[in-house]
Image: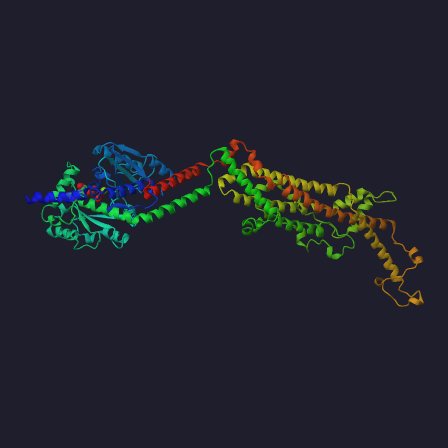
Amino acid sequence: MTRIFKMGSYAGNDAVHDQPTPGNLAILTKVDKLRELIGTKVALPQLVVVGDQSSGKSSVLEGLTGFGFPRDAELCTRYATQITCRREIEESINVSIIPHADAPPHEKERVKKFHRTLKTMKQESLAELFREANDAMGIKTSTKSTSADGINLSAFSEHILKIEKLGPDEEHFTVIDVPGIFRKETEGITTEGDIELVRNMVKNYMKDTRTIILAIMPANVDPATQEILKLAKKADPTMTRTMAVLTKPDLAIESTMKNIAIQHVLGRRSDLSLGYYIVKNRGPDDLGMTLEQGQVKERIFFATEPWSVLRNTGRAGVFALKARVRELLVDLIKKEFPKLKADIVKERDGLRSQLDKMGQSRNNQYTQRAYLNRMGEAFQTLARDSLNACYDNDAIFDEQHELRLITRIVDESEKYSDVMSKNGHTRPFESDGPDKDPDESSDPTLARPYPELEDFDCPELEGIFDPSDVIMPTTDKKGDIMGYIESVYKESRGQDLVPISNTVISAIFKDQTKKWKPITLSYMTKVIFEIHLFIKEILKQVCPDERVREELWDGYLLEGLQKSYRVALDQAKLLLKIEREESPMTYNHYYNDNLQKSQAEHFVVALEKLGLEMQAPVDTKHTNVRSFEQGTFLSKAVLKALSLNMGNSEYNLKLIHDILKSYYKVSRKRFVDVICKQAVNHYLLRGEGSPLTIFSTQMVQELNEDQLDMIAAEDAPVKLRREKLVRDIQNFDDALKVLRGSG
Ligand code: GDP
Ligand code: MG
């Protein structure tokens, strides 16, 4: 009688805790909803069952959830299993796999495809289902160690098997079963590496502060020696979220062993603030017994000596355990809600900003065109600012000084003008003085006025430049222009009184300007490189997406750029040809001024000679001798006698030289200006077809639908990423609604 009474009171005790209060049920429901939405991204309050292999974890879990793992030695837990019970009208078991976050994408995709639904929990169908799940996870068995496609299978997996147990009588509850720790490998199945892998997995599942640890250990060994408690202590140093659960009390035969277990449960030997619990599950001999039958047996067991001393502790039996676990979970959840909310908001905002960075989605021609247009505009703005030296408009001009384009071009042009002025001529003109002697050995800029082509590393522009264009001609006779003029003159003179034909001038001029071509084309090359690098760099700025950039560059921009560079170079070559090879011509009065100045210089020389002769006193009144520089008085008679004192041919040579010298100066200045203004400024910088105008809204306008799609469509990974972000954000938003009670 007493015994029955005791059983009754025990059952009654349980009944009080058997169902959660409506408030608690609501909270547990909330957490399950959150787990659905964001469970893989934010740590939620949860319960994990850990312990050694075969300590009885799955059995405890079955007691808590009613979900029974198939009893098949082959199918012992090889991955974490999350079991969620939920109240639904229809009874069913849904099984799927939550992929491990670090798994390669194709594997994630593969395991995500696994979905099974069972209407009832029949042992055979469950065993079949688990075999399929193991297969999907790539778990090896004693008979199968490689997959169909030859990949080595492993004994354990870090994916999570998700089991939803739905039914009208279910209460919301989630527990995670983690593979058991083991210390010896099994030939052909587990390796030493697996031992460590599982230990790490267990540690990982225990570490989160929102996790309640159910440390399972058999009652027939002393808990003090249990490794799992040591691991739990590391994860939970204050031992405030670790609960020890003793199993297999029926296997504790010796009374000392039983006593140790009882002392722990009574809290007399416990260092855990949550304490020890004890349950008796079905053993290997209870194969035919249902869960309910097992639970009846458990009650009877704890009602008998010596275990009956535990009857009022609320710590013996699976129902007591479940009630306590539920309470703990609810407390933990309540405590964690504010922090959880903050975490969710933070996480969601992070995702939102990632999505913002990706810009608008580009799945049709309108969004694609808009996307490219924005880029084109940004490109034009940067180009304009760099041309107008508006360097304050964008921080990039401070960060990268090489992007201050116009400043660099002005520097380069000045250098060009300078080189042309100092070293452009083949031979120095007379009376230019020895300092202007273009001695190549003394002036390195002459031999190599600009970096040579190899100095630029840009294979894509190789076809545009002809290296022979920038080779400096070797000058045979250094310096002697008169000698050269004489040789040309002698080769071509006729009987004319005026000996100077345009042909002679032309020929000498062409030779005198031989270096213009390499100097000018080097300058052009340098400018083109500057512009090219500039365009490449700002394109990176306006189009950070590498794939789109490459598509734009290879498919559209590069070709256009090459063309515009060629046009500019051709222009420079044309100008060279016009200036050097066509008949000399100018309306510039400086030509005459220069010529007259040169001629005047001959008179000065002649006068100088006269002045020297006049140093002898001719007039007693002016006996004081004055040098020529001080000024000399000349009588009309003396002036009439003045003669340049040159032979015809010397006179002619001097005249040719003077004409050439005046014309050269006028021509050089005109040429340098026109190169800078026309070939560079117009064709390379500001003109309609300049390379800087190539990427514009105009160009985007001309793209057809296919081209747009080719350049601007998001590739599959980007699309997927965006879709995933959108989904995740939605889930976080929904999770917040759930937390606020409005979802
Ligand atoms: P797991 O490997 O930790 O998940 O352990 P299981 O729950 O699969 O149990 C391992 C073995 O111990 C099974 O054969 C169970 O029937 C048995 N077992 C579990 N709990 C008890 C118990 O309380 N008493 C007895 N006699 N056997 C148990
Ligand atoms: Mg197990």
Total of numbered circles in the picture? 0
Q: Nearer the viewer, residue 301 or 150?
A: 301
In the drawing, does residue 171 fall left or right of residue 701?
Answer: left
Image location of residue 339, percent across then percent down: 33, 49
Image location of residue 203, percent across then percent down: 28, 49
Vertical relation: 291 (above or below) 227:
above
Image location of residue 684, percent across then percent down: 63, 42
Name the residue furthest left: 1
Colour scheme of the picture: rainbow
Vertical relation: 439 (above or below) 118:
below
**Could you tell me which residue is drawn at 68 percent across and 41 percent down?**
573
Q: Quadrant of residue 683?
A: top right
Q: Nearer the viewer, residue 426 or 74?
A: 74
**Could you tell me which residue is drawn at 27 percent across and 32 percent down?**
117
Q: Nearer the viewer, residue 617 or 190?
A: 617
Classify the position of the N terminus by image quarter.
top left
Q: Quadrant of residue 66?
A: top left
Image location of residue 422, percent across then percent down: 71, 52
Which of the four quarters of the rendered structure image does ligand 2 lie in?
A: top left
In the drawing, does residue 216 fall left or right of residue 700?
Answer: left
Classify the position of the C terminus by image quarter.
top left
In the drawing, does residue 481 fall left or right of residue 367?
Answer: right
